[in-house]
Amino acid sequence: MLDKFKKPYDPTEVEGPLYKKWEESGYFNPDNLPGECTEPYTIIMPPPNANGSLHVGHALFVTLQDLLIRFKRMQGYKTLWLPGMDHAGFETQIVYEKKLEKEGRSRFKMEREEFYKETLAFTLENKKFTEGQLRQLGASCDWSREKFTLDPDIIKTVYDTFKKLYDDGLVYRGVRPVNWSTKYQTSLSDLETRAVERKDPLYYLKYGPFVLATVRPETKFGDTAVAVNPNDSRYKEWVGKEIEFDGLIGRVKLKVIADEYVDPEFGTGVVKITPAHDPNDFEVAQRHNLPAVEVIDRYGRLTEKCGKYAGMKVMEARAAVAKDLAEKGLVEKVDAEYTHTVLVNYKNENDVLEPRILPQWFVKMAPLADLARTAVEDGRVHFVSEQYRKIFFHWLEQLRDWNISRQIVWGIPIPAWFRPKTAQEGASEEMYIGEKPPGEGWVRDTDTFDTWFSSGQWPFAALGYPDSPDFKNHYPTSVMETGHDILFFWVMRMIMLGLYRTGEVPFRDVYLHGLVRDAQKQKMSKSKGNVINPLDVAEKYGTDALRMALLIGNTPGTDMALAEDKIRSYKHFANKLWNVARFVLENTDQGNALSPGSQGLALVAKDQECQAQFDALATDITHDLEEYRIYLAAEKIYHYLWDEFAANILEESKSILKTGTPEEVASRKRLLMSVLSGSLKLLHPFMPFITEEIWGSIPGTKELLMVAPWPQVRE
RNA sequence: GCACGCUUAGCUCAGUUGGUAGAGCAACUCGUUUACACCGAGUAGGUCGCAGGUUCGAGCCCUGCAGCGUGCACCA
């Protein structure tokens, strides 16, 4: 039986079979756990996007969550780790569109149904693949409860929430400025944008008696006023009057309005107001009852209102308009290197977003934000790293309503219907919210939900709100562990929608991990060639080694550096442990008659000290884990095993076993076995595979290590 | 502009409630004695960003400054 210890530890031989053993044991399912466990401990897995393979960030969340789950499972909690997969609406659509592009195809040349079907097939295939990868990383989640974000019951919950929000006046259909992607032909929420710095010319244009500065001369055809600050003495006499000038495609008359929005210090203190293509101008227009004239269409081309410029793309039109204006002497000066920011698609920096006014569905945020704020203030939701609490509050202060409608195919269709009203009734159309409208003549809204609207409901939806036993037993969940980059996208929305829908917070603790970067702290990216593929390194060094490398030195909320060297060093550690086990087993009559963790050990004084030292370590590590000081706990067990157990205890055991009295020898053997088995327990959540494998070689261990009782805490 | 972080050994980072600085990797010297060379013994390497302050005592608390990073933000 000990033959396998004669050669170095080989993770590739043991990991696959061990995972199978765990999965077949049924212990991933809280209902099957041995003993009397009633106190629930629950983690809802952030569902990975089913549109590609797992990256090292996924490996990190799997490692952290699996560690917590295994720790709590051994502590005797009724542990549920509920896995899921995300259809990931817009992001998957981008991935799939790219794939189509490579094949010389386009979504815009396909029927909606056809596109949807293909994307679904693609997603389901990836889903299966991803599930396999999660298993490879050792995830001890309950596969029998796995959910997919497009499961019918999930969609039903999402629809119910939408209806409830609508009935409560928290969802409304508004015609408002939104961020429009001309490339992907959809609007995006404010979070799905990024402001990037650009250098563009700032044109000083002559508007009759005025000169005003703009970076977008091509929108001039949509001007419906010019504005000045009410306190600006330079222009006071003009307020309320009209100016008239050459507008390039004919004479133009514009009213001069006064609005606080205008900063007299900037440019000339005069602003052109283009309500249809600038959110600020839209606000101004609302206050002054100005019309909005659409001069840029959904494809980013100028409309027929723009005379000879109609049909030109924005940048092309900008150059043409600027040139023509200059020729007519209507450009006073140009600041060629003006630095400003433009909003781009967060997934594609080349996709500059156009502000457009469109009918969309919005969620009123203020009441939901209040719910969330209170829950965090009074501690019902606790952020493990304090900094995120501050960031959270800061964000709540500047919330705008959330656009949840997308003009994409891949997603959950919005359950809304429209029907033209008869002339007598006045209003142009009526609306129905729900899946089946009564009567004839209804047309369904073709928009789909922002994925984060449904994801925001994930904890209670995945647990089967409101009636399932799982919801009753496992909600609120214990901890939400996810990346800090989706704090606003996801964590906030879950808190808001969870509270709104169920009246309770979705989770008590929030643990946010940082980004995994390369050894030089560079972002990993395919183009830089510095990507560490978690499955490759797991194959090379063992999953346990990868897990340790991801845990040690990784503080919550802070980005971490990961290099192959680091992973390799923990492979060495695994081998160290392997040899420690070999030594102990060889020198304790292969552990015969020495049941691990046996009570009432008769130890000599010296060994009692060693045992006490171990007990103190176990207590310490337990506290660290309970308070999410995972990096410290990992370092401590590592340090103990290598520098204390192996370097000191084992070394001195050699002479004791050779020359000690029979009592000393017996005591030492018990100690070795006791510390080994205890260490395996402490280390199991960190390095589940090798610890389980060694555990299985200790005579007398009938049950799996994954459900062995956690070492006792001595207070 | 507002907010939040970070600045500790060559590199990447720990340092839990304030008590004379730690890890991994890298470097150098020595060592193949049966748990392990995926090892061991040892060496070198830090005025803990700067300036003040509180304290018997500060990497840790306070103030200011500098540099870097991140998030948020409608200045044309």
Image: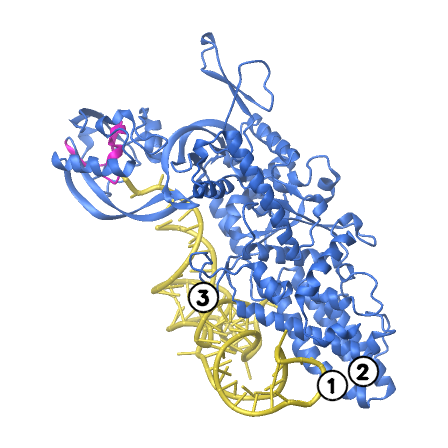
| SS under mark 2 | helix
| Chain ID, mark 2 | A
**Which tint was used for chain B?**
yellow
Pick the front one: A517 or B67:
A517
Q: Which residue is mark 1?
A: A652
A220 in the magenta segment: yes
Residue A414 lies, in percent from the top left, at: 54, 29
**Which tint was used for chain A?**
blue
Residue that appears at 45% across and 43% down:
A98
Q: Which residues are magenta?
A: A209-232
Q: Which residue is mark 3?
A: A520
Q: Evaluate if marks 2 and 3 touch, with contact meaning CB atoms under 8 Å apart.
A: no
Pick the front one: A327 or A1:
A1
A464 in the magenta segment: no
| SS under mark 3 | loop
Residue A391 lies, in percent from the top left, at: 49, 50
Q: Earlier in the sequence, mark 2 or mark 3?
A: 3
Q: Which residue is mark 2?
A: A605
Q: Earlier in the sequence, mark 3 or mark 1?
A: 3
Badge 2 amino acid: Ala
Q: CA distance from mark 3 to mark 1?
A: 41 Å
| Chain ID, mark 3 | A
Q: Is residue A617 above or below residue A271?
A: below
Q: CA distance from mark 1 to mark 2?
A: 15 Å
Number of dots carrying numbers: 3
In the picture, the quarter occupied by the C terminus of chain A is bottom right
